[in-house]
Amino acid sequence: MNSSYWQCTSGCGSTLNIANVNYICTGASQSENWEQGENVFTYTFAGIGPYKVEFTGGDWVTLSYGSPGSWSIGTVVYLAKRNDTNLPNTSPVTTGKPTYRVQYGCRNEILIPVVDADGDDVRCRWSNGTECVSICDALPNAVIDSNTCTIRFSATHTSNGTFAVAVTVEDFSKSNISIGGHVYSTSSPLSTVTLQFLVKTPPLTVNCNDKPVFVSPTLAQGFTVHVDILKALNVSFYVSGSRRITGIGLTTPAGMTYTPLQVDHSRNKTVFVRSMWRPQQNQVGSHILCALAEDVLGKTSESRCIKILVKDISPCDSSPCEHGGSCIRQGITQNYVCNCVSGYTGSLCQTDIDECSSHPCHHGGTCRDGVNMFSCFCSPGFTGRMCQTDIDECASRPCQNQGTCNDLVNQYNCTCMAGYSGYQCQTDTDECVDHPCSSLFDCQDLVNHFSCTLNTGKLMAILMSLMLIAGVLTFLFLLAKRRRYKDVDHTWLANFQDIRKPDSQPKLVFRTKIPHKKLQHRWTVERIRKLFFTFCKNNGD
């Protein structure tokens, strides 16, 4: 069908062909002359929409009711994000057989299977206007339960008739939400999907309730099966009836296969088919699998439909990126790339980047690698993040007494002012150490020179010493010149008795006047004698 297209008929400015309607066949009936299928296509719209996408065609087959004419199926694409999921809304999914066979004259029900990936409420209604074009209300005496999507009608209009059915499926949020700034209440449909099929009413000579039925272990109507992409799924349908079952028709997702009709040897008049499916990457989302059994007389069972939710298994789910790297999936494939955090590299961010490989530390510093960083352990005398700065050992002004500091690597030296010495010029040079002053002068150390000051005490001591020496010499000279006792005339002593004997002579009284008034000293002759004797004795006479 390369010449038939899905078209954008509203919102695109003009009618555009966006994809052909080729599909993968998922079911067919040669006797009823129909086939059905599904396909997935991708189209990039210029904005968020809304855009109306349709497939229109020529006349319907001849119908027993209504005026068959052109037909149209379509949907509305609106890519604005919901405020509850932060994703665009997902329309409900439905499926069914192109043709349903119901017994003429019987009360019948057709359950339309629906599923919504967003978990919204799904309701069904009769299509109207451009949704159905020429087949609006084309099934007489039919009513629809909007909440369960069940059509109920009595097939009494025409025996062996053909009728068209047009149903619109809509999703409703469970609470008020906004999409693209527009608020949707629980009574406002988020999207619409049209469903159209045929109903045929063959006359049968059997009881209306005598029809094939699904039996265990067939899954219950509406049961939901979860499966991961690329994982095998097997679903079996078992049917039993009062007459021979001639077929179990399946409406399947694309790519699902199933076995021919098989006999269940453990039970009488029971047959089954087993379906096999391995969903692909582009089949993530909701699918419906329906079965309809038919016996040898053409009597059909009720539809048995189950929901299949295909879960996307992202290659990022296993967290392949190491060290906090972000996994970025490539489209809907199983390929991914790792966006590494700073400091790591490699396809899985498994390698710690060696920030020391460029040798960033200067002046012999040792580099230690970290995560997205490095640390430098500097050689003595250097500092800074990369040891780029020579430490100024002169910053603390270690040189004293106005000495000049010379900064070196991890050390310093001082150039001292004249008159000072030492490592920090802390020592005043002693200019008096060589005794530059004469003995009578004291040396006073000054900065880079000295002064001599006369020591008066030392001069007085010398003078006193000289005077003492002169006095001693004078005494010795006089002593040498004195006359001895034996050389003196002592005849004047003849009148005195022996002075060593007790004094028996009359005492001679001397009276002497001294400057002090009223004070007199009396000296006896005896005292004079004793003094004189003592003097002579001491001088060797």
Image (tube, rainbow, N blue to C red):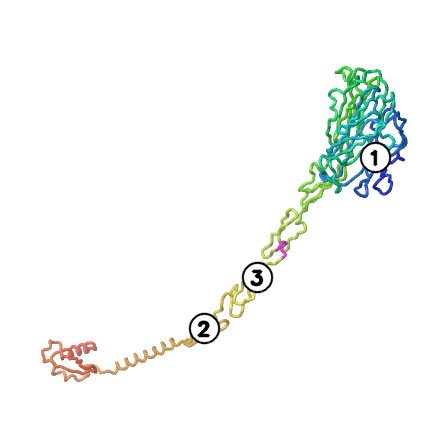
Secondary structure under the numbered disc 3 in the rendered image: loop
Q: In the figure, residue 320 lies in which quadrant?
A: top right
Left or right: residue 193 versus residue 317 is right
First along the sequence among labels 1 and 2? 1
Point out residue 207 in the picture as x, y percentages from the top left corner.
81, 16
- What residue appears at the point 54 percent right and 67 percent down from the top-left corner? 402
Foreground residue, 104 or 218? 104
Q: Which residue is mark 2?
A: 444
Q: Which residue is mark 3?
A: 395
Say above or below: 298 vs 530: above
- Amino acid type assigned to the residue bearing label 3 in the image: Ala
- Amino acid type assigned to the residue bearing label 2 in the image: Gln
- What residue appears at the point 65 percent right and 49 percent down from the top-left corner? 373
**Looking at the image, is mark 3 or mark 1 nearer the viewer?**
1
Point out residue 297 in the picture as x, y percentages from the top left corner.
84, 17
Secondary structure under the numbered disc 1 in the rendered image: strand
Left or right: residue 17 versus residue 507 is right
Give the class, few, some or many, for how many residues have Cα within 10 Å of label 2's Cα (few <14, many ≥20).
Answer: some
Point out residue 195 in the picture as x, y percentages from the top left corner.
82, 30
